[in-house]
Amino acid sequence: MTLPKGFGSGSAGGSSSADIERMIGKRVENMTGMITISFWAALIATFGGTAAGYFYYPWAYPTASGHFAFIVLTIIETIGYIFCVKVMEEGSNKNSNGIIGASVAGAVVFVLFVSLYVGW
Amino acid sequence: MRIHCFQNSYFIFRINMLSNMAQMPALIPKEVEIQRLKKIWLIVIAMGSTAASVEVDNFVDGSLHQTSIRDSAFTPAHWWLYSHFITLPLGWGASAIYDRKVPVLRGPNNSMNTGLKMTILGYLATMFTIGVNEMWHFWFVEEIFAVPNHWMFNMGVVVAFMGALAYVVRVYARLVELGAETPGENPYVAEMYKMALEGKLYSRAIP
């Protein structure tokens, strides 16, 4: 197989597994940590958006609406998060069900706490 | 002097292209291509989640306006509503830059993917129509859906969505072709994928 300039052993033209690894860079199945951090960043940003409603515009943005939006959005973000990790790890022997489970459970606890105690 | 003419091999090449579209030549190692396609797919899922959340925010904005009639760009529901104006261009831009590493996603003459070109063209039409729309509404205030100044908005958005959908479907179909994704369990869909892999999906006349 013809490889881009800089890859391969020279005149022979064949590709070694080391070349393939260099072309791939960071493998998607090893991105679970980054995806999890992104999920939590999105969740906290979402809370920031609704919190501006609870604390700064309570007269214009009913707290119940904010909580409803926060719950629905967390569900959407969680589905995206699970899709991301599952699709990236399928076909590999990696398995991050523990990380996903802990992360989703943490999100559920966080959302319940916010919905019950924040902004009322 | 050689007079340029189409040779027979040109037509044979076209026939092969048409009957074997699902079997693109492998220009990079299969494993590399799968990894790169999945990185693009990550961006697609992130953009899809953002778009879905903005759909929810349409209702949040409606809730806000139950109590607040005055509007500003800085109400929380609007920060969130306008977040996709940042997320989606950044996401599509990242896809357009990164997919240069995936040969099957290139357009003619190694240009940008045709689907992304259609999307850009569609939104350019929409942007041009903003001016047309402002001129129209200077004279006629009522917002009636079918007035001519809205036509190009709608056509532009449809063209843009078709292009984006074509791009996303191409990425997914290629993942299926490479065996990285399992086609749907619906037997009709599975049959379509089988025919695509055999190169028969696009033309039953040419086996």
Image (tube, rainbow, N blue to C red):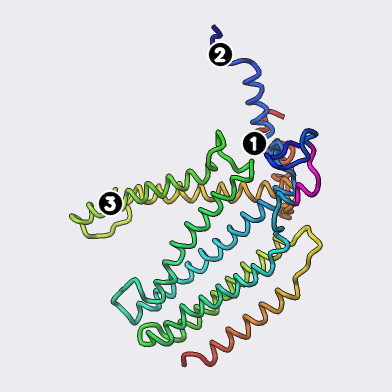
Q: Which mark is residue A96?
A: none
Question: Mark 3 or mark 1: which comes first in sequence?
Answer: 3
Residue at x 70%, y 79% (from the top left corner): A102
Q: Position of residue A96 (x, y in %)?
A: 75, 70
Q: Quadrant of residue A108?
A: bottom right
Q: Give the extent of the magenta segment.
A: A14-21
Q: Chain of mark 2?
A: B
- Disc 3 versus disc 1: distance between alpha carbons? 41 Å
Q: Position of residue B92 (x, y in %)?
A: 52, 54
Q: Which residue is mark 1?
A: B202
Decide whether the magenta segment is chiefly helix, strand or loop. helix
Q: Is residue B188 visible?
A: no
Three-letter code for the amino acid on which mark 2 is drawn:
Cys
Q: Which residue is mark 3?
A: B131
Three-letter code for the amino acid on which mark 1 is drawn:
Tyr
A85 horizontally vs B49: left or right:
right
Q: Which residue is mark 2?
A: B5
Residue A83 against residue A2 in the figure, above or below? below
Question: Mark 2 or mark 1: which comes first in sequence?
Answer: 2
Q: Chain of mark 1?
A: B
Q: Nearer the viewer, mark 2 or mark 1?
A: 2
